[in-house]
C-alpha cells in the first residue's frame, strides 16, 4: 500500500485528493491529515480514512478535535509543532496543500523523509525555491507539481531535453475582472472578487486570481521549478481555462496541455505518476468547444505580473517579501481596510521600502532567514496600509 499524508486536507485541493483516494481505498494507507478550522470535516475524513493522526493548525481547537474524534482511535493534535510532526511521519506520498507561507516548513519536513511531495503550495517555491529544491536533492525526494499550469508543463516535458526549450507559456483565466476598466476595479467588492468564472477554489486563491497575483506567484514558481530564465516565461490570458500551459521548443513547435478545469487531473497525475490512471474528469468535446481564445495580459490594470518580474530580477529573498506583502494586502482587502487596486499598490510600496536593505534580501536561504524576511514584510505592509488610510493634511 502507498502511505499518504495530506497537509491541508480540508481545503479544495485536499478534498479533491481524498476524493481520488476514496475511489481506490485498498491502494492507500492514510498516515496523517491536517486542516484549519473546519474541525467537522477534518474529523470526518480522519475517521473515514482511518488516519493515524489528525492535526488542526489552531491550538484553541484541540479540544474540539479530540471530542470529534472520541472513540475513533485517531490521534488528535494541534499547532505548528503538530503540523511538523504530521509531515515527519514516514509516508511515500505527501500532498502539500496548506495555504500560504505557512506551508513551507511542513513541506520541507516532508521532503526530508525522502518520498514524493505533491506540491500545491506555490508559496514554498516563491519564498524559498533554492532551499526547497536543494532539500529534495539532498534527501532523494521527488517533487511533483500540482498547480494545473505546472503539472501541464511537467507533462509536456516528458521525454524532452530542457536544453531544447525556448519558452514556457502559462495561461490565466483573467478572473472575474478580465474586462473591467480600471475605474471599476477601484470599487470591486470582496464578494465580486471571490466569484471565479471557471474554477471552484478557496476564497483567498480566488481573489488572488482576480488580481492576477496568483499568476504572478506561478510565474516565479515556474522559474524555480523548471530552472528557466524569467525572460523565457510568458503569460497568456485564456478565458476558457482549457489550455493550461504550453512549452515552446527551439524548432518552433508548441506543445499544449489541454484539459477540463478540474484539479483532479493534476492531482491524479501526481498521485499515479509515472502511470496514467483512469480519472473521474470530463472528457473534452473539442468540436463542441469550437474555438479557444487568447489575449495578452494588461499590466496597467493588473500590475502583479510586472512586480513578479522585478522580484525575479532582484533575486534573493525578494520572493519571500513579495509573498508576505501580498498575503497581508489580501488580509487588508478582506477586512475592508484597502480597496482592490490598493493591494498591488501596497505590495509595490513594501518592495520599494525593503529593497535597499541588502542584508535582509541577500541573507541566504534557510527557514530562519525566510521567516525573518516574511515578518519584516508583513510589518511593513501593515505600516503601508496605515499610512494610506491616514488623513493627509
Image (cartoon, helix red, strand yellow):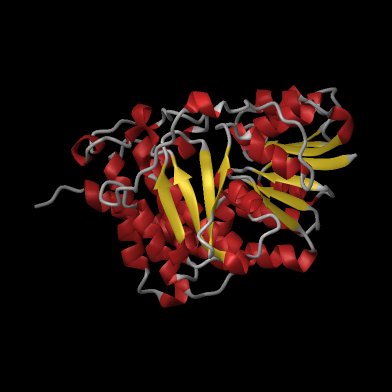
Give the image location of residue 48, x and y in percent: 80, 24
Is residue 338 in view?
Answer: no
Left or right position of 196 against 370: left
In the image, is 63 to the left or to the right of 390? right
Quarter of the view holding residue 181? top left
Q: What is the quadrant of the N terminus in the image? A: top right
Q: Relative to 236, does residue 70 appear above or below in the rendering?
A: above
> 124 and 376: which one is in front?
124
Above or below, 153 relative to 60 = below
Instruction: Confirm whether residue 303 shows in the render.
Output: yes
Q: Viewer-proximal residue, 248 or 152?
A: 248
Residue sitting at 71 percent across and 65 percent down? 135
Relative to residue 170, is residue 339 drawn left or right? left
Residue at the (43%, 58%) spot, across then down? 322
The picture places residue 310, in percent across and down from the top left corner, at: 38, 65
Q: Is the residue 163 above or below the residue 63 in the image?
A: below
Amino acid at each position: 500500500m502507498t502511505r499518504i499524508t495530506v497537509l491541508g486536507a480540508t481545503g479544495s485541493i485536499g478534498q479533491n485528493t481524498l476524493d481520488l483516494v476514496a475511489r481506490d481505498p485498498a491502494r492507500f494507507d492514510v498516515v496523517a491529515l491536517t486542516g484549519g478550522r473546519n474541525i467537522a470535516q477534518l474529523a470526518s475524513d480522519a475517521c473515514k480514512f482511518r488516519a493515524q493522526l489528525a492535526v488542526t493548525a489552531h491550538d484553541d481547537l484541540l479540544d474540539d478535535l479530540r471530542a470529534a474524534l472520541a472513540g475513533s482511535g485517531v490521534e488528535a493534535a494541534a499547532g505548528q509543532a503538530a503540523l511538523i510532526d504530521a509531515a515527519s511521519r514516514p509516508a511515500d506520498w505527501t500532498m502539500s496543500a496548506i495555504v500560504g507561507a505557512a506551508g513551507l516548513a511542513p513541506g520541507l519536513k516532508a521532503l526530508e523523509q525522502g518520498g514524493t511531495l505533491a506540491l500545491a503550495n506555490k508559496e514554498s517555491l516563491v519564498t524559498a525555491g533554492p532551499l526547497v529544491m536543494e532539500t529534495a536533492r539532498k534527501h532523494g525526494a521527488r517533487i511533483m507539481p500540482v498547480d494545473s499550469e505546472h503539472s501541464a508543463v511537467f507533462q509536456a516535458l516528458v521525454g524532452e531535453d530542457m536544453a531544447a526549450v525556448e519558452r514556457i507559456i502559462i495561461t490565466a483565466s483573467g478572473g472575474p475582472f478580465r474586462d473591467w476598466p480600471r475605474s471599476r476595479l477601484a470599487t470591486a467588492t470582496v464578494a465580486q472578487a471571490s466569484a471565479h468564472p471557471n474554477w471552484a477554489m478557496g476564497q483567498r486563491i480566488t481573489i488572488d486570481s482576480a488580481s492576477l497575483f496568483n499568476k504572478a506567484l506561478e510565474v516565479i514558481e515556474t522559474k524555480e521549478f523548471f530552472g528557466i530564465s524569467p525572460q523565457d516565461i510568458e503569460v497568456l490570458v485564456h478565458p476558457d481555462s482549457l489550455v493550461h500551459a504550453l512549452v515552446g521548443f527551439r524548432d518552433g513547435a508548441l506543445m499544449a496541455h489541454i484539459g477540463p478545469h478540474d484539479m483532479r487531473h493534476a492531482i491524479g497525475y501526481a498521485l499515479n505518476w509515472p502511470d496514467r490512471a483512469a480519472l473521474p474528469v470530463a472528457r473534452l468535446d473539442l468540436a463542441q468547444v469550437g474555438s479557444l481564445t487568447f489575449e495578452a495580459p494588461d499590466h496597467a490594470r493588473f500590475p502583479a505580473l510586472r512586480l513578479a518580474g522585478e522580484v525575479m530580477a532582484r533575486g534573493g529573498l525578494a520572493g519571500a517579501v513579495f509573498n508576505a506583502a501580498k498575503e497581508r494586502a489580501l488580509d487588508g482587502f478582506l477586512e475592508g481596510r484597502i480597496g482592490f487596486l490598493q493591494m498591488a499598490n501596497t505590495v509595490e510600496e513594501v518592495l520599494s521600502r525593503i529593497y535597499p536593505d541588502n542584508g535582509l534580501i541577500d541573507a541566504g536561504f534557510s527557514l530562519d532567514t525566510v521567516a525573518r524576511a516574511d515578518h519584516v514584510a508583513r510589518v511593513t505592509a501593515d505600516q503601508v496600509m496605515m499610512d494610506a488610510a491616514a488623513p493627509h493634511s
